[in-house]
Image (tube, rainbow, N blue to C red):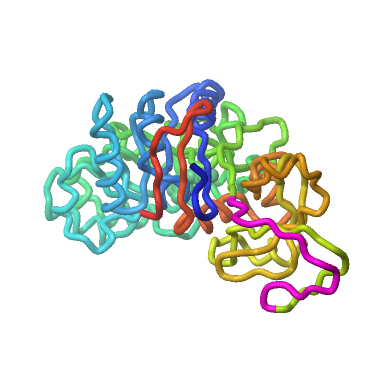
Amino acid sequence: MIPARAWLEVDLDAIVANYRDLRAVYGGPVHAVLKRDAYGLGLRGIAPVLAGAGCREFFVEDLPEAHRLLAALKAHPCPPPQVHVLAGLGGRPPRAFAVKGVRPVLGSRADVARATAVPGMAVTLQFDTGLARPGLTPDDLAALGPALARLDVVHVMSHLAVMGDPDAVSNHDQRRRFLAMAAAFPQAGQSLPSSAFVFAGPGWRIGAARAGSAVLGTRHVANPAYRTRPAVRMLAPVIDIRDHPAGRRIGYGRHTLPRPSRLGTLMLGYADGLPDAFWSRAPAVEVAGRRCPILPEVSMMQCFVDLTGLPDSALPRARVAVVFGGGQDINAFAGRLHTQPNRIITGTGASVPRRHVTGARETGARETGA
Ligand SMILES: *Cc1c(COP(=O)(O)O)cnc(C)c1O
C-alpha cells in the first residue's frame, strides 16, 4: 500500500553489508553508533539486524534510547549487548544506570563524582583530546584518581576532529594524547576512530571503531576511494493528477502556469523537514523513471510536480515520486543542496514515517518518530 504522505525507505540489507565491509576493512571490532534514533532512520529496526551481523556494542544518545535499544534486541536471539550512553548521566541519578550492559559515558568531573554513589559501577570514560566537548583532561584524571578507583572503567574513548583529512597534524596530536591518557587504564577497552578513520590505514586502528555514518551509508569522509552503500530513499505519493490551461494560477497563487500543463499533487511539504535549499533550488524528483520539476509553490504538506513531459502510458506508474535515492543517492542529493547527508536524514527523520525493507520485502517495521 502506498502511504498517505512522504516516507523514508531504509534498506536493512545495505546497512548489514556496510557493517560487514567496515569490519573487514578495519580489521578490528566495530561498534555501531545509533544515537538520535539511528540518525533518524529508526533504531528499532536497525539495531536487531546489526546485532544479527555480530555487532555487540552500541552507542546511543541517552538512557531512554538505551532502553529502546535493549527492548528492540529483546525479541531477537543475540548475546547481551553493551550500550554506551553518550550523554553521560544526563542529570539522572547514577542508580538509574544500574541496568545490565548499560554504561554512561562520563566526560566531566561532576559526572564521575556523582557516579561514585554506585561503587563499582561500570562506566566508559570520554577524554578531551582536542575537541573541547565534554571529556576528561589529564588534570581531571589526576584530580579524580581516588574517585575513579571506585568505578569499574571498562572502556575509554575520544573523538577525532578532522574527518576530511585523517593525516591532519591535530589528529596526530589527539591520538598521542589519547594513548597517553589511556595508559592509566590498562584493563579498559579503547576506542578512538569514527567512520572516517576506519579507512585511514592501520595507524588509526586504535581499539574499537565507533561508526554511524559508514554503517548507515551516508558520506563520512572526503575519501573517494571508499564508498558505502546508500541505504535510504525518500518517497512521496502523487495523490492527484490534473491538466491545466496556460495562465492558471496554482496553489496560493505564487505561480502562474506559462503553458498548458499536467500537474501532480505531491504529498511533500515544508513540514517534511527538507532543508530550505531544496525548495529554493528548483528541484526535480523522479516520477515513472523521469526527472520531473517541482513548481515554486510549496505548502505545509504538499507541492506540485510538473508531469507534462510524461507520456500517457507512464501515468499508471506515476503514483510515487522518488525525492532522493533513485538516480540521485542521498549523498549526491545532500551535495547538491550544499549540506551533509546526516543533516538530511536527521532533519526528515523525526516526523516522516520510515519503512524498513530487506531485499524487495518490507519487514513490517513501520516507524514514526521516537
Ligand atoms: C556520532 C559519533 C560517532 C560516529 O560518527 P560517524 O562519523 O557518524 O561514524 C562516534 N563517536 C562519537 C563520540 C559520536 O558522537
The quadrant holding residue 350 is bottom left
Q: Nearer the viewer, residue 324 or 310?
A: 310
Establish if 307 lies above or below 195.
Answer: below
Q: Answer whether residue 349 is visible to the viewer in this image.
A: yes
Quarter of the image that includes the C terminus: bottom left
Percent coordinates x, y for residue 194 in the rendering: 51, 40
- In the rendered structure, the answer to whether residue 44 lies left or right of residue 8 reads left
Residue 33 in which image quadrant: top left
Predominant SS along the magenta part = strand
Image x and y of residue 257, in percent:
82, 69
Q: Is residue 276 magenta?
A: no
Does 189 sit left or right of 319 as displayed? left
Residue at x 54%, y 53% (from the top left corner)? 6
Q: Which residues are magenta?
A: 236-252
Residue 247 drawn in magenta: yes
Q: Is residue 316 above or below residue 344?
A: above
Kindly identify the residue that appears in the image at 37 percent across and 25 percent down. 52
